[in-house]
Image: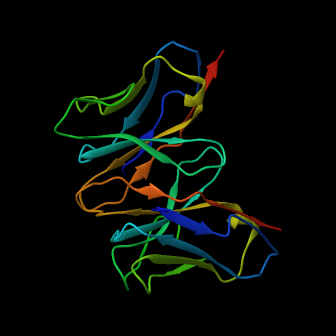
Amino acid sequence: GESVGLHLPTLSVQEGDNSIINCAYSNSASDYFIWYKQESGKGPQFIIDIRSNMDKRQGQRVTVLLNKTVKHLSLQIAATQPGDSAVYFCAEKSYGQNFVFGPGTRLSVLP
Amino acid sequence: NAGVTQTPKFRVLKTGQSMTLLCAQDMNHEYMYWYRQDPGMGLRLIHYSVGEGTTAKGKVPDGYNVSRLKKQNFLLGLESAAPSQTSVYFCASSYGGQGGTEAFFGQGTRLTVV
């Protein structure tokens, strides 16, 4: 069956450094991927998405990379700030199916 | 534009009690979803709806019922609450589930069943 997972359940980075959060997926039919950010006590918030016809997509300070060959998704956050501290989820979706969410990675930004 | 609004935000139930969680969205989205979030686990889909008057089971539907009488509202009911239903519940909506568009989430309802 399809599944979405994360390599690192927790990640600590120094303020100002770049962060990389990884995600593995198993459904080769998945064609749409999203990264969500969830702050404590709040609902998940959309960060960036990417479709399977792309390898890379950039937003403001964030970049998502998709490697379909190894079924791997990553979120890169440039110049990590204290406000980036949160749990980050990846989600995958294939046509006609609902989103499947990973368990999340907690990002802690150290001063 | 409020987005997705959930009520209540917190609730404590005794085992066997019933309650309804309300979700409202003002984005004219066709698709709405109810998830539960438990420690160490990803969001798990309980039920979803692809349009007014329709509902479908997700991955963990047992013990829950839903209704979508109006396009903007999606209700989640617990007929007889159990401690295993202690969780944080999130409602979400999206423009379309087929093509792949982002889901917008509410702030969550923290439910404790004692």
What residue is rendered at 37% in x and 82% in y? B54
Q: Find residue A86 and report its image quarter.
A: top right
Depth check: give the residue in front, A60 or A94: A60
Q: Is residue B105 above or below residue B53?
A: above
Q: Is residue A42 above or below residue B88?
A: above
Instruction: Tell me where residue B67 appears, x and y as whole percent.
Output: 48, 83
Task: Look at the image and tell me whether residue A9 can be seen.
Answer: no
Instruction: Tell me where residue A104 appears, x and y as whole percent.
Output: 53, 39
What residue is rendered at 61% in x and 49% in y? A42
Q: Is residue B17 above or below residue A11?
A: below
Q: Where is the C terminus of chain B found, in terms of image quarters?
A: bottom right
Is A23 placed left or right of A85 in the picture?
left
Is A30 placed left or right of B107 in the picture?
left
| Residue farthest left in this picture | A53
What residue is rendered at 34% in x and 73% in y? B50
Task: Look at the image and tell me whether residue A85 can be seen.
Answer: yes
